[in-house]
Image (cartoon, rainbow, N blue to C red):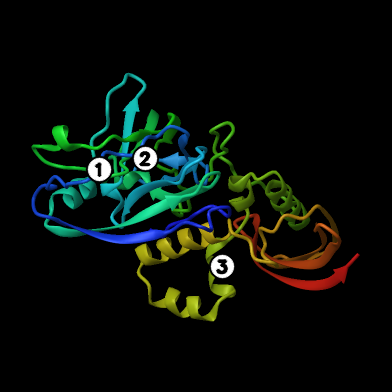
Amino acid sequence: MKLKQSSNAANKSCRLGLILLLGVIIPLNVMAAETSSGIDFNIRFFDRRVYYAESDPINILITITNNSPLTYRFKLADERVFSIDFDVRTVSNRPLEPADVLRRKRTEYQQIFFREIAVEAGESFSFVEDLRNYVKIGQAGSFVVQAHIYPELYRFGIDAALTQPVSLESKRLNLSIWPPLATTAEGIPLEMDVATGAVLVRERLAPDQVVDYMISARQKSQWEKFYLYLDLEAMLVARDAARQRRWLNESEEGRKRMVDQFRQELKNPSNDGISLIPTDYLIEETRYNNFEGTVTVLEKFKNTYFTEVKRYTYNMRFKDNIWTITNYSVTNLGTE
C-alpha cells in the first residue's frame, strides 16, 4: 500500500527505523508518546460505494491533521498493522474478529521497518488502508468502525497491556454491508442503487438514451448508474492491445480481477476519459442497425479561464435486446 499524503503536506521529514520482532514485540526504550493536543485523527471512506459481504476492498482514508503550533512526530510502520488498528462492532456492540492476515503478521518472526513522520503545524498526512486486512467482515449488516493509531507502534504479546503506548482514536464511522452481489443468469453482476439499495436493471433504451443516461449519471457522481450500460470487458480489451493479449491468456478469475481493476481506473479520469465530467453536452447524431451503432456527442468542459470542446463518439452494441457502450473515441475541437 503506497502512502498517500495530502497536497499541503510537502514538508514532512521521514527517518527509517528497524525493530526485530521475535514471537512478541519486545518493549522498547522509547520516550512517552507526544501529547495529542491539537492533533486530529479522522477516517472516512476513500471511495464511498455499496460494499458487499466477502467481496470488494473497503478502503478507508486515514488522515492526521496537526492543528497545534508545534511539529507532530510519530512512527509509521511499513507493515501498517503495527501502526493502525480497527475496532468494528455490530449495532449490538459485538466486536468482529481480527482478520487472519492481521494475526499472522503480528505473530510471525520478522523485521519491522518504520519511518518517523513529521507533520508540521497546519499540515495533514493521509494514507489508505483496506479494512478487510484488519477485520473479518463476512456477513451483511450495519457496523460501527473506529480506528486507532499508535505513534510509538503497536505492542503485541503478554506484556502488551503494560507497554502499549498511548493511541489516538478516530471518530466513529457507520458502515453498511450488503448481501453478496446478485448476478444475472450469465454471471454478470447486478448494479445496486447506493441511495435506495434497489437493484438497477438495464432497460430497453435507444442508443442515444443510453449515452444520455450514462453522462447524466456521471454528472451526478452516481457511479453505479454510470457503469450500468458500460460493457467493461469489451472496453478493456478494445482500448489496450497489451491488455487484450493478457486477457486471452488469463483464467476466468484473472479476467474478473482485470475487470475490477479497470472499473476502479475509470474513477480516475484522464484528460479524454469517458468518466470526465462535462459541464454541458449535446447529442449530435445517432446511427445504428440491428447489431451495432454510434452516438456522437458534443461535450464541453469548463476550466478556470476557458472551456474545452470535445466530440465523443460512442460505439454501441445490441445484445439481448439491450444497447451497451463497448468503446469510444475523442476528437479535441479546441476552446471557447
| Residue type, numbered disc 1 | Met
Q: Is residue 332 above or below residue 190?
A: below
Find residue 194 and report its horizontal and vertical position in percent. 56, 37
Find residue 239 and report its horizontal and vertical position in percent. 59, 74
Find residue 20 and report its horizontal and vertical position in percent. 14, 57
**In percent of the image, x 58 and y 41: which residue is there?**
200
7 sits left or right of 287 in the view: left
Q: Is residue 175 above or below residue 94?
A: below
| Residue type, numbered disc 2 | Ala
Q: Marks 3 and 1: CB-CB under 8 Å?
A: no
Q: Is residue 262 above or below residue 8?
A: below
Closer-to-camera residue (85/204): 85
279 sits left or right of 192 in the view: right
Image quarter where the C terminus lies is: bottom right
Identify the secondary structure beneath mark 1. Answer: loop
Image quarter where the N terminus lies is: bottom left
Instruction: State the residue position of label 3.
Output: 234
Q: What is the C-alpha distance between the residues marked 3 and 1?
A: 57 Å
Q: What is the C-alpha distance between the residues marked 3 and 2?
A: 27 Å
| Residue type, numbered disc 3 | Ala
**Of callouts 3 and 1, which one flags the residue occurring earlier in the amino acid sequence?**
1
Instruction: State the residue position of label 2.
Output: 53
Identify the secondary structure beneath mark 3. Answer: helix
Q: Is residue 155 above or below residue 238?
A: above
Disc 2 crowd rating (10 Å Cα; few below 14, some 14-19, many 20+) is some
Circle on res. 31: 1
